[in-house]
Amino acid sequence: MPNSASTADESTNSLIPIKKDFGTSFAFNKAEESQFDIESLREELKELSSELKSLHQDFNKTNKKNFERDFDLLFLPTEGKFYPDGRKSLMIRYLTAVEEKILCNEFLIKTGRAYEFLMQNLIVDDDFDLSSLLLPDFQAILMFLRSTSYGDKMPFEYLCAECHKKNEHDVLLSSLRFKDPIQTPDENGLFYITLPKSNYKVAIKLLSYKDAMEIDKEVESDFFFYVDDGKQEKIRRTVSNKTIYNIQSINDIENRESIKKAFKTISKFDSDVLSKFIKECEYILDSKTDCECEFCGNIAAYNFNIGREILSLPPSFKESIIEEVFLLFYYGKGITQSEASQMPVYERRSLLNRISREIEKKNKAESDAHSAANRKRA
Ligand SMILES: [Zn+2]
């Protein structure tokens, strides 16, 4: 799903603003690079590298954590109401080139393996059962990673409801909150409803992120039929399956096959009641934002879809990652390839920007000296 306003019927992928940031201030492109005398450049960089090393140490000092990689504590939207140990927060490592490369792989993204890898690699708490990670908490982790790696601003495009022109709007990820469910869970994190027609007592659980991935894998065009008051109805298998994933038990029976069987016998009326109830049990990201159209000035609220795609990188970005890691290793003497690969994205880019500024400064000083010498000679 591309990032788009839900009211817009046309949408465009907004790519992560990768090169924008770092490209504007970084002085080299390949053509320019070849003009440099590598030996003299090396000399200059020797000086620069000691400066960089201390900068690197500063970065580590400010984090003051004796772990191999920096991390942060993230408070979970579900606030400990659903995990057996009442867990309210998780320690999350920052994104590095190691994960970025995985996120460039379309196959791994499509199959969900990329996100599994991400969670395994980035959740520090090793006593946490990853398969139990709930969908809203997973979403919060993705937003945290996106915000701390590529900036808090997320650009979206939407079509103005009044003049239908395309607008761009930035949403601040850190400002978004999840709305609590309307229904209240019991002490085990389950929601109960008794269906009006069948009288089934159904226990509803929140979806885990793995459930969500499984649901996405279901084929959309797949329908199944059932009989309601003697009339044959058809509904999309995806819709029904999503509901199945949400059901913990029917009449206290937790066996999956029995649940599926019982579920197939319920009427459309009960099914609708159940779907509505499940919606009221969900945590929903409140992304509604007032936007002013830059063409007609119309102010309206738009809902922006924020899903897994906020962290999927274009395959072509892999080249840039390799290049950035190499440049940091090459110009930041003392930083190994492996250190550059395992450096948080924001840190890697800050250092590259810093190197770039220093090189620009040196180039300018050099060309000023050169012009001065020429003037003297003239
Ligand atoms: Zn407008």
Image (cartoon, rainbow, N blue to C red):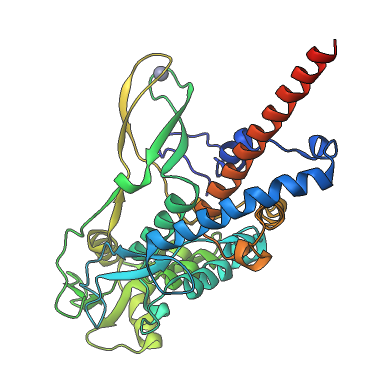
Answer with left or right where residue 197 lies relative to residue 255: left
Quadrant where the C terminus is found in the figure: top right
- Residue at the extreme top: 378
Q: Is residue 141 visible?
A: yes
Give the residue drawn at x 82%, y 36%: 31
Answer with left or right where residue 42 lies relative to residue 294: right
Whether 37 is drawn above or below 145: the answer is above
When asked about the image quadrant of residue 297, the answer is top left
List x then y, in percent, for residue 246: 33, 72
Task: Work out whether residue 195 or residue 149 is closer to the camera in this orientation and state it.
Answer: 149
- Residue at the extreme front: 376
Q: Is residue 309 visible?
A: no
Give the residue drawn at x 54%, y 40%: 14
Whether 198 is drawn above or below 305: the answer is below
List x then y, in percent, for residue 268: 31, 64
Task: Work out whether residue 349 or residue 128 is closer to the camera in this orientation and state it.
Answer: 349
Task: Work out whether residue 200 or residue 307 is closer to the camera in this orientation and state it.
Answer: 307
- Total number of numbered discs in the rendering: 0
Whether 143 is drawn above or below 202: the answer is above
List x then y, in percent, for residue 74: 32, 63
Whether 121 is drawn above or below 350: the answer is below
When asked about the image quadrant of residue 26, the answer is top right
Give the residue drawn at x 22%, y 67%: 79
Task: Work out whether residue 177 or residue 63 is closer to the camera in this orientation and state it.
Answer: 63
Specify the quarter for ligand 1.
Answer: top left
List x then y, in percent, for residue 355: 62, 44
